[in-house]
Image (cartoon, rainbow, N blue to C red):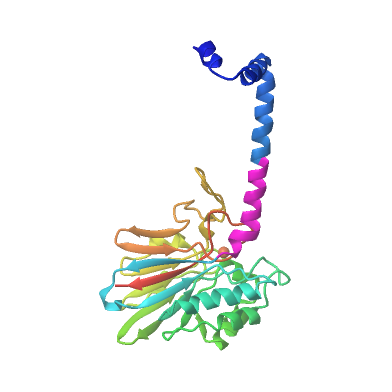
Protein backbone atom coordinates (compact mmCIF):
# COMPACT_ATOMS: atom_id res chain seq x y z
CA UNK A 1 0.00 0.00 0.00
CA UNK A 2 2.84 2.35 0.85
CA UNK A 3 4.48 1.82 -2.59
CA UNK A 4 1.22 2.41 -4.49
CA UNK A 5 0.69 5.57 -2.47
CA UNK A 6 4.16 6.83 -3.33
CA UNK A 7 3.69 6.14 -7.04
CA UNK A 8 0.79 8.56 -7.14
CA UNK A 9 3.08 11.44 -6.12
CA UNK A 10 5.15 13.54 -8.58
CA UNK A 11 8.67 12.27 -9.31
CA UNK A 12 10.61 14.97 -7.35
CA UNK A 13 8.49 14.55 -4.21
CA UNK A 14 8.88 10.76 -4.40
CA UNK A 15 12.64 11.26 -4.54
CA UNK A 16 12.64 13.55 -1.48
CA UNK A 17 10.48 11.11 0.50
CA UNK A 18 12.83 8.25 -0.43
CA UNK A 19 15.89 10.26 0.75
CA UNK A 20 14.05 11.20 3.94
CA UNK A 21 13.19 7.56 4.68
CA UNK A 22 16.81 6.48 4.24
CA UNK A 23 17.98 8.52 7.29
CA UNK A 24 18.27 6.57 10.55
CA UNK A 25 15.40 6.98 13.06
CA UNK A 26 17.76 8.50 15.65
CA UNK A 27 18.43 11.45 13.34
CA UNK A 28 14.71 12.29 13.13
CA UNK A 29 14.33 11.90 16.88
CA UNK A 30 17.07 14.47 17.44
CA UNK A 31 15.48 16.90 14.94
CA UNK A 32 12.07 16.41 16.63
CA UNK A 33 13.55 16.96 20.10
CA UNK A 34 15.25 20.17 18.91
CA UNK A 35 12.00 21.50 17.43
CA UNK A 36 10.08 20.65 20.61
CA UNK A 37 12.83 22.25 22.71
CA UNK A 38 12.67 25.48 20.70
CA UNK A 39 8.86 25.50 20.94
CA UNK A 40 9.00 24.91 24.72
CA UNK A 41 11.54 27.73 25.12
CA UNK A 42 9.50 30.19 23.03
CA UNK A 43 6.27 29.30 24.93
CA UNK A 44 8.04 29.64 28.30
CA UNK A 45 9.37 33.10 27.39
CA UNK A 46 5.92 34.19 26.17
CA UNK A 47 4.26 32.89 29.36
CA UNK A 48 6.88 34.61 31.55
CA UNK A 49 6.35 37.93 29.71
CA UNK A 50 2.58 37.55 30.11
CA UNK A 51 2.81 36.57 33.80
CA UNK A 52 5.27 39.35 34.71
CA UNK A 53 4.29 42.31 32.53
CA UNK A 54 0.71 41.82 31.42
CA UNK A 55 -1.53 39.78 33.71
CA UNK A 56 -0.61 41.57 36.99
CA UNK A 57 -1.64 44.88 35.38
CA UNK A 58 -5.07 43.61 34.26
CA UNK A 59 -8.19 44.37 36.26
CA UNK A 60 -11.33 42.28 36.01
CA UNK A 61 -14.68 42.77 37.70
CA UNK A 62 -16.29 39.54 38.92
CA UNK A 63 -20.01 39.61 39.66
CA UNK A 64 -21.92 37.46 42.16
CA UNK A 65 -25.58 37.37 43.16
CA UNK A 66 -26.49 36.49 46.74
CA UNK A 67 -30.01 35.82 47.94
CA UNK A 68 -31.10 38.00 50.87
CA UNK A 69 -34.54 39.66 50.39
CA UNK A 70 -34.01 42.18 53.20
CA UNK A 71 -30.95 43.53 51.34
CA UNK A 72 -32.53 43.17 47.88
CA UNK A 73 -31.18 45.72 45.40
CA UNK A 74 -28.11 46.54 47.47
CA UNK A 75 -24.71 46.39 45.79
CA UNK A 76 -21.47 45.76 47.59
CA UNK A 77 -17.90 45.89 46.24
CA UNK A 78 -15.15 43.82 47.83
CA UNK A 79 -11.48 44.45 47.01
CA UNK A 80 -8.52 42.74 48.63
CA UNK A 81 -4.75 42.13 48.58
CA UNK A 82 -3.69 45.42 47.02
CA UNK A 83 0.03 44.99 47.82
CA UNK A 84 0.85 48.56 46.85
CA UNK A 85 4.54 49.08 46.11
CA UNK A 86 6.50 52.31 45.61
CA UNK A 87 5.65 52.52 41.91
CA UNK A 88 1.94 51.72 42.14
CA UNK A 89 0.31 55.15 42.39
CA UNK A 90 -1.22 54.90 38.88
CA UNK A 91 -2.35 51.34 39.61
CA UNK A 92 -4.05 52.59 42.79
CA UNK A 93 -5.87 55.29 40.79
CA UNK A 94 -7.04 52.72 38.26
CA UNK A 95 -8.36 50.37 40.99
CA UNK A 96 -10.19 53.16 42.83
CA UNK A 97 -11.71 54.42 39.56
CA UNK A 98 -12.99 50.92 38.76
CA UNK A 99 -14.44 50.51 42.26
CA UNK A 100 -16.23 53.86 41.97
CA UNK A 101 -17.51 52.92 38.51
CA UNK A 102 -19.51 50.07 40.09
CA UNK A 103 -21.56 52.58 42.13
CA UNK A 104 -21.65 50.32 45.17
CA UNK A 105 -23.71 51.11 48.26
CA UNK A 106 -20.91 49.83 50.49
CA UNK A 107 -17.25 49.00 49.79
CA UNK A 108 -15.36 46.43 51.84
CA UNK A 109 -11.58 45.94 51.86
CA UNK A 110 -9.93 42.60 52.63
CA UNK A 111 -6.47 43.70 53.82
CA UNK A 112 -2.86 43.32 52.59
CA UNK A 113 -2.44 46.93 51.55
CA UNK A 114 1.38 46.73 51.67
CA UNK A 115 3.83 45.13 49.26
CA UNK A 116 6.77 43.22 50.70
CA UNK A 117 8.07 43.27 54.24
CA UNK A 118 10.20 46.43 54.34
CA UNK A 119 9.30 50.14 54.33
CA UNK A 120 11.40 50.67 51.18
CA UNK A 121 9.25 48.14 49.29
CA UNK A 122 5.75 49.37 50.08
CA UNK A 123 3.96 52.59 49.23
CA UNK A 124 3.96 54.96 52.22
CA UNK A 125 0.94 54.26 54.42
CA UNK A 126 -0.31 57.86 54.12
CA UNK A 127 -0.28 57.60 50.30
CA UNK A 128 -2.21 54.31 50.40
CA UNK A 129 -4.79 55.81 52.75
CA UNK A 130 -5.18 58.92 50.55
CA UNK A 131 -5.55 56.78 47.41
CA UNK A 132 -8.19 54.47 48.93
CA UNK A 133 -9.82 57.49 50.63
CA UNK A 134 -11.08 58.48 47.16
CA UNK A 135 -13.45 55.47 47.18
CA UNK A 136 -17.03 56.69 47.25
CA UNK A 137 -19.88 54.64 48.75
CA UNK A 138 -22.96 56.10 50.49
CA UNK A 139 -23.01 53.31 53.11
CA UNK A 140 -19.31 53.69 53.90
CA UNK A 141 -15.97 51.95 53.40
CA UNK A 142 -14.86 49.27 55.88
CA UNK A 143 -11.95 46.87 55.95
CA UNK A 144 -9.67 44.55 57.88
CA UNK A 145 -5.90 44.15 58.05
CA UNK A 146 -4.03 41.34 56.30
CA UNK A 147 -0.90 39.49 57.36
CA UNK A 148 1.33 41.84 55.31
CA UNK A 149 -0.03 44.92 57.06
CA UNK A 150 1.61 43.91 60.31
CA UNK A 151 5.01 44.72 58.79
CA UNK A 152 4.31 48.34 59.64
CA UNK A 153 2.91 50.11 62.69
CA UNK A 154 -0.68 48.88 62.47
CA UNK A 155 -2.04 51.62 64.73
CA UNK A 156 -0.55 54.27 62.44
CA UNK A 157 -2.08 52.52 59.44
CA UNK A 158 -5.51 52.27 61.10
CA UNK A 159 -5.34 55.97 62.06
CA UNK A 160 -4.28 57.01 58.50
CA UNK A 161 -7.23 55.07 57.06
CA UNK A 162 -9.61 56.51 59.68
CA UNK A 163 -8.62 60.06 58.69
CA UNK A 164 -9.65 59.18 55.11
CA UNK A 165 -13.02 57.82 56.25
CA UNK A 166 -12.12 54.10 56.11
CA UNK A 167 -12.96 52.02 59.17
CA UNK A 168 -10.55 49.11 59.70
CA UNK A 169 -12.32 46.67 62.01
CA UNK A 170 -10.35 44.71 64.61
CA UNK A 171 -12.59 41.99 66.08
CA UNK A 172 -15.49 44.44 65.94
CA UNK A 173 -18.58 45.27 63.93
CA UNK A 174 -20.56 48.23 62.67
CA UNK A 175 -24.20 48.66 61.73
CA UNK A 176 -24.54 49.86 58.15
CA UNK A 177 -27.71 51.37 56.79
CA UNK A 178 -28.41 51.88 53.10
CA UNK A 179 -31.80 53.52 52.62
CA UNK A 180 -34.27 51.30 54.46
CA UNK A 181 -31.91 48.33 54.43
CA UNK A 182 -29.52 47.52 57.21
CA UNK A 183 -26.86 44.96 58.04
CA UNK A 184 -23.81 44.48 60.22
CA UNK A 185 -20.32 44.36 58.79
CA UNK A 186 -18.01 42.42 61.10
CA UNK A 187 -14.24 42.48 60.68
CA UNK A 188 -12.08 39.84 62.33
CA UNK A 189 -8.37 40.19 63.04
CA UNK A 190 -5.85 38.39 60.86
CA UNK A 191 -5.66 34.68 61.68
CA UNK A 192 -1.88 34.32 61.60
CA UNK A 193 -0.50 37.64 62.85
CA UNK A 194 -3.20 38.87 65.23
CA UNK A 195 -5.74 37.46 67.68
CA UNK A 196 -8.97 36.65 65.87
CA UNK A 197 -11.99 36.33 68.11
CA UNK A 198 -15.21 35.33 66.33
CA UNK A 199 -17.38 35.56 69.44
CA UNK A 200 -16.30 39.15 70.05
CA UNK A 201 -16.52 40.05 66.35
CA UNK A 202 -20.03 38.81 65.56
CA UNK A 203 -23.02 40.77 66.87
CA UNK A 204 -26.12 39.18 68.41
CA UNK A 205 -28.68 40.49 65.99
CA UNK A 206 -31.60 39.71 63.72
CA UNK A 207 -30.01 41.78 60.95
CA UNK A 208 -27.89 40.10 58.24
CA UNK A 209 -24.18 39.90 59.09
CA UNK A 210 -21.37 40.10 56.54
CA UNK A 211 -18.03 38.92 57.87
CA UNK A 212 -14.69 40.21 56.60
CA UNK A 213 -11.74 37.91 57.19
CA UNK A 214 -8.43 38.28 55.38
CA UNK A 215 -7.93 34.49 55.30
CA UNK A 216 -10.68 32.10 54.19
CA UNK A 217 -9.49 29.50 56.73
CA UNK A 218 -11.93 30.99 59.25
CA UNK A 219 -14.84 29.58 57.21
CA UNK A 220 -15.05 26.24 59.03
CA UNK A 221 -15.70 28.07 62.34
CA UNK A 222 -18.15 30.66 61.02
CA UNK A 223 -21.69 30.08 62.37
CA UNK A 224 -24.63 29.69 59.99
CA UNK A 225 -26.15 32.98 61.13
CA UNK A 226 -23.50 34.84 59.11
CA UNK A 227 -25.00 35.67 55.72
CA UNK A 228 -21.72 35.93 53.80
CA UNK A 229 -18.00 35.69 54.53
CA UNK A 230 -15.63 37.68 52.29
CA UNK A 231 -11.94 36.76 52.11
CA UNK A 232 -8.78 37.24 50.07
CA UNK A 233 -5.21 36.22 50.96
CA UNK A 234 -4.98 33.35 48.45
CA UNK A 235 -4.44 35.47 45.29
CA UNK A 236 -6.30 32.72 43.44
CA UNK A 237 -3.11 30.66 43.69
CA UNK A 238 -1.30 33.50 41.84
CA UNK A 239 0.23 31.00 39.38
CA UNK A 240 -2.33 28.51 38.13
CA UNK A 241 -1.11 25.91 35.68
CA UNK A 242 -3.42 23.89 33.43
CA UNK A 243 -3.99 20.34 34.76
CA UNK A 244 -2.00 21.19 37.93
CA UNK A 245 -3.93 24.06 39.49
CA UNK A 246 -2.85 26.76 41.91
CA UNK A 247 0.86 26.81 42.81
CA UNK A 248 0.90 29.30 45.71
CA UNK A 249 -1.67 28.34 48.31
CA UNK A 250 -0.78 29.83 51.71
CA UNK A 251 -3.42 27.91 53.62
CA UNK A 252 -3.57 24.71 55.68
CA UNK A 253 -6.69 23.95 53.62
CA UNK A 254 -4.56 23.78 50.45
CA UNK A 255 -6.28 24.72 47.21
CA UNK A 256 -9.77 24.17 48.61
CA UNK A 257 -10.59 27.86 49.05
CA UNK A 258 -8.16 29.37 46.52
CA UNK A 259 -10.79 31.49 44.78
CA UNK A 260 -14.51 31.65 44.04
CA UNK A 261 -17.91 31.11 45.63
CA UNK A 262 -18.44 28.45 48.30
CA UNK A 263 -21.61 27.24 49.98
CA UNK A 264 -21.40 24.66 52.74
CA UNK A 265 -23.91 23.78 55.48
CA UNK A 266 -26.01 26.86 54.71
CA UNK A 267 -22.96 29.16 54.87
CA UNK A 268 -21.69 31.22 51.96
CA UNK A 269 -18.21 32.55 51.26
CA UNK A 270 -16.60 34.45 48.41
CA UNK A 271 -12.81 34.35 48.11
CA UNK A 272 -11.33 36.99 45.82
CA UNK A 273 -8.13 36.44 43.87
CA UNK A 274 -7.19 39.96 44.96
CA UNK A 275 -5.32 42.67 43.12
CA UNK A 276 -1.57 42.49 43.74
CA UNK A 277 1.26 40.01 44.05
CA UNK A 278 3.41 38.78 46.92
CA UNK A 279 6.42 36.43 47.11
CA UNK A 280 6.76 36.30 43.30
CA UNK A 281 5.87 39.29 41.08
CA UNK A 282 3.91 37.04 38.71
CA UNK A 283 0.30 36.18 38.03
CA UNK A 284 -0.74 33.46 35.64
CA UNK A 285 -4.35 32.43 35.10
CA UNK A 286 -5.22 34.31 38.31
CA UNK A 287 -6.29 37.70 36.96
CA UNK A 288 -6.48 40.59 39.47
CA UNK A 289 -10.10 41.32 40.28
CA UNK A 290 -12.56 43.33 42.27
CA UNK A 291 -15.72 41.55 43.39
CA UNK A 292 -19.22 42.96 43.01
CA UNK A 293 -22.02 41.36 45.05
CA UNK A 294 -25.63 42.14 44.17
CA UNK A 295 -28.21 41.09 46.77
CA UNK A 296 -31.61 39.91 45.59
FE1 LIG B 1 -2.04 39.06 49.90
**Could you tell me what secondary structure mostly forms the magenta stretch?**
helix
Extreme-front residue of the structure: 10
**First to last magenta residue range:** 41-58
When the figure is inspected, residue 105 is found, relative to residue 46, above or below; the finding is: below
* Residue 117 image position (x, y, % from top left): 67, 66
User: Which residue is painted at 49% across and 76% down in the image?
Assistant: 99
In front of the other: 118 or 102: 102
Residue shown at 46%/72% (left/top)?
Answer: 78
> Is 51 drawn above or below residue 92 in the view shown?
above
Q: Quadrant of the C terminus?
A: bottom left
> Residue 279: image x %, image y %?
64, 58
Tell me which corner region of the image, top left, top right, bottom left or bottom right, holds residue 197: bottom left
Q: Indicate the quadrant of ligand 1 in the picture.
A: bottom right
Residue in view at x 40 percent, y 77 percent: 185
Residue at x 51% of width, y 44% of height: 244
Compared to 188, does 182 lie above or below?
Answer: below
**Res 116 → quadrant:** bottom right
> What x and y, as percent, mark residue 32?
65, 28
79 with respect to 125 (left or right)? left
Where is residue 193 drawn, in percent x and y?
A: 57, 66
Q: Residue furthest right?
A: 120
| Count of picture labels | 0
Judge whether residue 173 can be spotted in this image: no
Magenta span contains residue 117: no
The relative height of residue 213 versus residue 261 in the rendered view (above or below) is below
Nearer to the camera, 57 or 3:
3
In the rendered image, is residue 59 in sight?
yes
Quadrant location of residue 178? bottom left
Amino acid sequence: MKIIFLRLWPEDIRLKVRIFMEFPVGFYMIVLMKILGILFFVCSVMLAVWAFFIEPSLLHVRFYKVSCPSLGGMRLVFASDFHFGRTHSKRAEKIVAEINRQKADVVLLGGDYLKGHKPESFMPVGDIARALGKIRAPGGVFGVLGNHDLFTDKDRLIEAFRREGINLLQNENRFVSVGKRGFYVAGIEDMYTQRPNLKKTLPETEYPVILLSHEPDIYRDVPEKVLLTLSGHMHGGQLRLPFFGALIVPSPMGRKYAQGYFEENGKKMIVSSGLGTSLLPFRLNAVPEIVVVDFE
